[in-house]
Image (cartoon, rainbow, N blue to C red):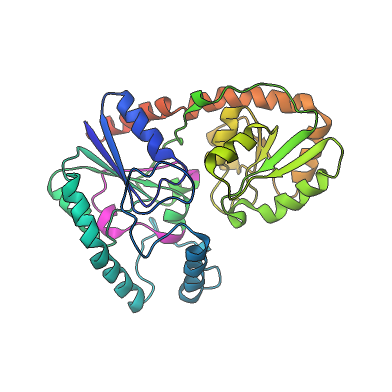
Amino acid sequence: MKILYIAPENTVGTLSLWKEAHEARGNECTFVTLYPTKHDYERGICLNLPLVKANPLYMKGRHQYYKLARGREGDYQEKNGYPPVWEPNSFLEKKYFQFRDWLWAFKVEQVIKEFNLLKYDIVHLDWGLEFYRDGRFVKTLVAAGVPIVCTYHGQDLRTRGVIPAIDAVSSLNLTSELDLLKKHPDIHYLFLPYDTGQHEPVFNMNDTIRICHSPTDRYYKGSETIIPICEELAERDNVEFVLIENLPHAEALRIKQSCDILIDQVHNRGGWGYGMNSVEALSMGLCCVTELVDEYVKFIPDHPFVNVNSNKLKETLENLILNPEKILEYKKRSREWVIQYHDMHNTANILYGYYKDRGLT
């Protein structure tokens, strides 16, 4: 079986993991990205298209535009709907996407022919997006009998919405964000895949307890709450705070593995609970601190997280610092749990179960 992934970027390296997991089953897997990721993940067939980037300047500019088009929350403004549906916010925005589709077509159509992208058995659309905003490539695939699978991450449904032409023909919708199950009438949960075998955790403690925070977006992670508390705790002789930010992924992993505690997020602005940041830390055997809403606790009742909120964060960290044996207990539980739920071969078993249920294989 031949499987194709199309994604704006290989954001946290999951495309590489899916490729490895599919190929371990004897299938062929290719992924195409629209632009390079800001981190050092594999790019696959990278089109490096214009008018879209992963850099802060582009993101800030988009946010300012959406503040004018949507209101003061801009790019963070959540949409209503079941599912929420994307549509241009203005006539100019509509013309912009029409122009972008026209411009991109020169390179996209060449790549489709060069790599024979119409000759795949299943096509996954990461972020629920293809090359064109009008869905023309998906329409061609469906006309050729190729099933479409959409994977939605946090902001794809929360602030953008589904692309109508794509959602109408999708055979399977997936997400690793629990709250998104309430935003689409036909979507299924799939744990993020991870290569848990790449880490060999050592279950001991540093003499100076190292607490780290590694935000990809400070607003979504609640960093304005986390960082001051950690800096205050680091004034103690036996505590060190490490902020891991804007580093190559390999270096970020190396630093993370030297720590004892990872604080993922509070406030649940970018989704509930945890993401790849925590999955990496769990696999390394770190004690992971994050905010889990009641729905998430019910969904993963055997979780290994230290559950906090912004009001209890300092108190919880102080308790861990005073009782390092608790940190060691969480470290051991972390590693066992992440292998069970997030190991890429175990998540692939679930994915292929969905394929079978939907008649895609």
Where 107 sits versus 244, above or below?
below
Where 335 sits versus 123, above or below?
above
Q: Quadrant of residue 211?
A: top right
Residue sitting nearer the eye, 43 or 217: 43
Please provide percent x and percent y for residue 53: 42, 59
Does residue 323 appear in this view?
yes
Residue sitting nearer the eye, 24 or 107: 107
Does residue 275 appear in this view?
no
How many numbered callouts? 0
Residue sitting nearer the eye, 234 or 111: 111
Where 63 sits versus 253, above or below?
below
Instruction: Tell me the magenta residue range.
Output: 159-178
- Residue shown at 28%/33% (left/top)? 355
Left or right placement of residue 113 versus residue 4 in this view: left
Left or right placement of residue 349 versus residue 248 in this view: left
Please provide percent x and percent y for residue 224: 69, 56
Where 59 sits versus 33, above or below?
below
State the quadrant of the C terminus.
Answer: top left
